[in-house]
Image (cartoon, rainbow, N blue to C red):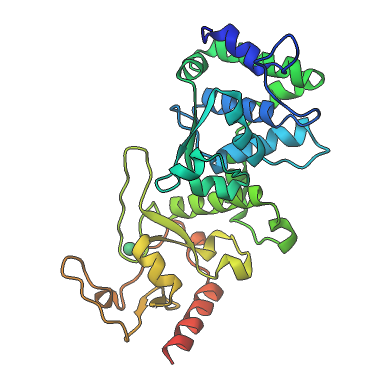
Amino acid sequence: MIKNLAYYCKKFSPRSKSNKIGLNVSPGAPNKPILLLSIIEMVSQGQIKGNQIPLSAELIATFLKLWSRLEPLRNPDIGLPFYHLVSDGFWHYQPKPGFESLIAAKVKIRTPNIIRQTVEYAYLDDELWEIMQNPQERSILTNVLIDFWFIKKAQDIEQLLQVNAFAELQDQLQRSGGKVYKLEELKDEQKLIVRDAAFRISVLKNYNHRCAFCGLQVFDPLSQNIVDGAHIKPFSKFYDDRFDNGLSLCKNHHWAFDRFWFTIDEHYNIIVADNLREDSPNAKPMREFRGDRINLPAQEQYYPRQDSLQWHREEFLRRAA
Ligand SMILES: [Zn+2]
C-alpha cells in the first residue's frame, strides 16, 4: 500500500469492517485521537521540529488541555496512547540506551514516568512526518480526527488548537512567582511532570541558564543546557515551587548542594563545608569559592528567599556538627 495522505486518513479513522487499517480504539476512550491532535498541533506551532517526539512536559500539557475539553468525564492518561499506538504501525519507539531489549520484548511500559525513563522518543513513519510538514495536508488529517471522533465539539477544538497550554501555564506561574502546592494537587503523575518542567524552565531563565555557584553556562545546538533548576527547600517535603525557592545549579553543584557540601548565607555568600577532601587539578576547587557571592538573578524578586536559605543552612550545620 502506498503510504500517502489517503492512506493516513484511513489510518486516523476508526477501525471497522470496511476499514481494517483504522485506529484501534476502545469505545468511548479517544486517547489516540487526542494524542494525534496534540502532536499535529505542536508540529504546526513549531514545538515539535523534527521526527522525534519525546513524552515531554509540553506534549503532556497539550494532551491534558485537549482532554479536559473533549473528554471531561474520564481521567486522562497519556501513557496509554503513547504506548498502545505502536500497534497501529505508524508510531515507533527509540529506546534509551540500555532499554533496547525491554522495548523489543514489548513489555508494557504504560505510565508516563516509566516511558520517560525507557523511551528516548517516539517517531512517526517518514511518510507521515513529511505529510505533517505541509499545512494543508496537516489540516486534512486534523479534520479527519475531528470529524470521526469529536464532531460535536468541532468548534471548541479549533479555538483550543490556538492555545499553547505549556506556555500559558508558564506565563501564569511567572506572573505569580510560582506556587506552593497542596498534597492532593500532586497525585497525578502527568501534572507533576508538567509542573516540574515549568518550575525548572522558569528558574533557569531567571538565572540566565548559569550555575549560581560557579557561573558555568553551556548550550548545545538543541538549546539543551547543563544547569538544573534546583529546589532550596526540597520539593518532596515542602511542595514549594515558588521561584525564590529555586536555584540554577550545574550538575556537580546541584549534587553538592543537595548533600549540604555547601550552603549560602543571608547575604548570598557561599559557605563550603570544611570536612571535604577535594582534589581538582583542572577546575577551581569548591573551597576557593568560600565567601564569594553567588550569581544572582537579574530581578531581585527571584533572589533566593531568606527562609529557604535559613532552612538549608540549618541542615548544613546539623550535618557539620
Ligand atoms: Zn556549578
Kindly give the residue lying farthest to the front in the view shown: 105
Q: In which quadrant will I find the C terminus?
A: bottom left
Q: Is residue 225 left or right of residue 34?
A: left
- Above or below, 14 against 266 in this view is above
Q: In terms of image quadrants, where is residue 165?
A: top right
- Image position of 37 with respect to 288: above or below: above
Q: Position of residue 216 (x, y in %)?
A: 30, 57
In-front residue for pair 310/122: 122
Q: Nearer the viewer, residue 178 or 53?
A: 53
Q: In front here: 23 or 315?
A: 23
Specify the quarter for ligand 1.
bottom left
- The residue at the point 75 percent across, 16 percent down is 148
Quadrant that contains the N terminus: top right
Residue 13, percent across and down? 69, 16
Q: Name the residue rendered at 73%, 8% in the picture.
A: 18
Location of residue 205 in the rendering, given as x and y in whole percent from the top left corner: 45, 50
Would you place residue 254 above or below residue 68 in this image?
below
